[in-house]
Image (cartoon, coloured by chain):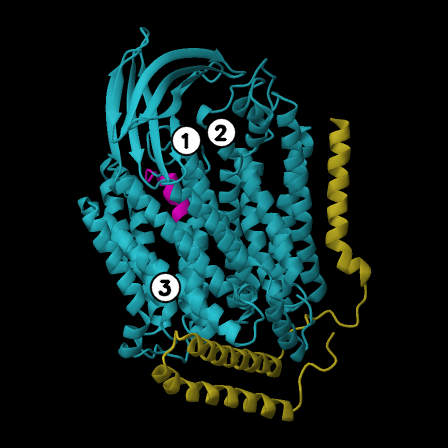
Chain colours: A cyan, B yellow
Amino acid sequence: MPELGRAALLVTLGLSAYAVIAGAYAAHLGRRRLARSAQNALVASFVSTAVAAAVLVAALLRNDFSFEYVARTTSRALPTPYTLSAFWGGQEGSLLLWLLILTGFGAAAVSINRAWARDLIVWVVPVLAAVSTFFAFLLVAVASPFVTQAAPADGAGMTPSLQNPYMLAHPPLLYLGYVGLTVPFAFAMGALLSGKLDERWLIATRRWTLFAWAALGIGQLIGSHWAYVEVGWGGYYAWDPVENAALMPWLAATAFLHSVMIQEKRGMLKIWNVLLVVLAFSLALFGTFLTRSGVVNSIHSFTQSSIGPWFLGFIAVVVAVSLGVVLWRLPQLRSPTKLESAISREAAFLYNNLLLLALCLAILWGVVYPMLSEAVRGEAVVLGRSYYDFFLRAFGLPLLLLMGIGPLIAWRRASLKSLATTFRWPTVVALSTGAVLLLLGAGSSIPGLVAYTFSAFVLATIVMEFARGTRARKALGASSWPSAFTSLVSRNRRRYGGYVVHAAIVLFAIGVAGSSAFDSVAEAKLARGQSMRIGDYTLVYRSLSERQAPNATEIRATLGVRRGDRDLGTLEAGKNAYTIEQQVSNEVGIRSDKLTGEDLFVIAEQIDPNGTVYFRVFVKPLVNLIWLAGLVFLLGSVITLWPDRREQRRLVARASTVGLPATR
Amino acid sequence: MTLALVLAAALAVACVVVVALPFLREPEPESDSLDDLDADERRRLELLEARDRALAALRELEFDHRTGTVSDEDYRSQVGALRRDVASTLQALERDSGEGRPGDGRN
């Protein structure tokens, strides 16, 4: 039913365009019924987009190759989960997913807040609708997933590296993050356009921002794990432009989540916060542009298409209009409160913001420089790993340290004497850790040693904060230590959930430092029966086998693994030859040590017809802490996102005092 | 093809009805103006936000002092100003209430 899909998208375009025009007109002239009608149009656009999405899903599941998109991204041999994941595997489908999530989030955000912040919502609707109009237009006029053709006997199949379980979750999570950042942007613009610059836009968008940020963070970690196990070059992050595309809005959103606390607590940084929201959203659009325009030569840009100029034009309009509106409201955004001291929590958060932004902009420059150099000189000059590593160390290490310092300094101002007392124990722990590691030989990488020392400092401050807080709750009357701990976290979920997220970042930093600064590599061409050594490990190449999977021929080299005198069993590494796609992929062998977090990582780089194999082997200390960090990050995010009834009651009471409905 | 077109037409009609619903429900309303906050209500909302911000800051300082995150010296240098902030926002709200609580008659 491609006609139904096309018609549903046309309906979405009409509804979105109506919501923009009618919504803006109603907000400007104060027309109640028209404003409500525009809100209904936004909600209805979700339904029509869902119909279009259902048509595409049905076509994928039925292997209906009369849909050009289905024929291009799937084949009959493709397992069903990957057939479903083809929804976001190609350009048109992923744009449809963008629109589906956007209209869904828009409908939810409007429905949840339309009673509580109705004067704000009337301006939020046209902004949300403008974004969905752009995507609906692309899907109707430029990149339709419902183009039909005479059905071929079979489809072209899916890029082999995408045939991985992680790909079922990684792109949707990134899109939840990208699209989620539209909601704070729309509310910020709504607040600016309406002139209602009180706290409500921050309150209405707090959880949306947290959700989008958490989805982006977890999506990136899943993507890194996918790269680690599937792409098969021995790493998990290559500073690829499309990887950077997801990192940049995450960094901007991280800066916003910190600086928004300063606005909430001290009424400061209103201009900064609005600009960060605009930046995060623009970078989310830029990320989609990078992934989908084919403008960069990347393993992720599976498509070359004509949507690039449209995206660039839209990003330019978004940035220009947003900055224009911010300038227009500048007098209302100025805060009467000033920074009282350079040694205060708000100052520490400000330093954190500057470092995050500097890192974000350095990465942005690294991404756009090859494009600019190609446009100006006709030759793309790519900034390599050393460029990014330099800025990661220059800005990332101070950021790591600030993560321990910031939460322990008092708001407004702190005395040096107080700082000395507060940081005495964390400093002792950090210096002791550094000294021990130096004695153990970690001095071979100074950045790695510094990262470990700072990580120990931050972990010590986090443990200290939880311990002191629990003790204080116990003293305030909690019946037991567990109930004191529970009460501590539940009474201030953002603060203590934030500490859990900080602990995740520390684990991540330790994992990255261990696996990149202290890893080792060995290479050898082995015939059957020959062996190679790396560190304490000895690997013996035993056999080569070939087996047929539904969609690929799998060739595997089996290696016996010993560590010292201990037999650790066998490990398989090899290649998959995908028949339909006519591509070969590396299938790496990984042996994880659960106790130390270390991985033995084997790549069968080249398999000769006579059975000899060229192996590349890595030992990656602590790399599994990176994946553990993902679980801790998820826990911290859930704690911060969990609804806070006390805060809800306070907001309801505040709203009802001025006559707003007592619901959210 | 025909079924697809019928479904598409049904979808379009349903969406038009949903969009037109506010006008169908209230063809001739008493008032069609947006129920916006007036200047008094907005001022009161800002005062309430300032009060909540001051109270939260005082509560946090008290707790941080109790845990030891804020030293006695820093606590003493800040608590007076924060208490004055709370008192002044409460007084401002009281004055505002005395001038007549806005928002009566809202729904």
Q: Which mark is residue A461?
A: 3
Residue contact at pointers 2 and 1, CB within 8 angstroms: yes
Specify whether residue A62 is in view. Answer: yes
Q: Tell me the chain of label 3.
A: A
Q: Considering depth in this image, is A399 or A522 the residue closer to the camera?
A: A522
Left/right placement of residue A311 relative to residue B42 reads left
On the image, numbered disc 2 is attached to which residue?
Answer: A164
- Which callout, 2 or 1, points at the residue further toward the start of the chain? 2
The amino acid type, in three-letter code, at marker 2 is Asn
Same chain for the residues under marks 3 and 2 in the image: yes
- Which callout, 3 or 1, points at the residue further toward the start of the chain? 1
Which segment did they paint magenta? Answer: A238-247
- Tag 1, which secondary structure? helix
The Cα–Cα distance between marks 3 and 2, rounded to whole angstroms, is 39 Å
Q: Which mark is residue A23?
A: none
The Cα–Cα distance between marks 2 and 1, rounded to whole angstroms, is 9 Å
Q: Considering depth in this image, is A269 or A350 the residue closer to the camera?
A: A350
Residue contact at pointers 3 and 1, CB within 8 angstroms: no
Looking at the rendering, which quadrant does residue A550 occupy?
top right
The amino acid type, in three-letter code, at marker 3 is Thr
User: Where A84 falls versus A409 (above or below)?
Assistant: above
Q: Quadrant of the N terminus of chain A?
A: top right
| Mark 1 residue crowding within 10 angstroms, few (<14) / some (14–19) / many (20+) | many
- Tag 3, which secondary structure? helix
Q: Which mark is residue A229?
A: 1
User: Where A368 falls versus A604 (above or below)?
Assistant: below
Left/right placement of residue A124 relative to residue A249 reads right
Instruction: Judge depth for marks 3 and 1 and give the one in front.
Output: 3
Same chain for the residues under marks 2 and 1 in the image: yes
| Mark 2 residue crowding within 10 angstroms, few (<14) / some (14–19) / many (20+) | some
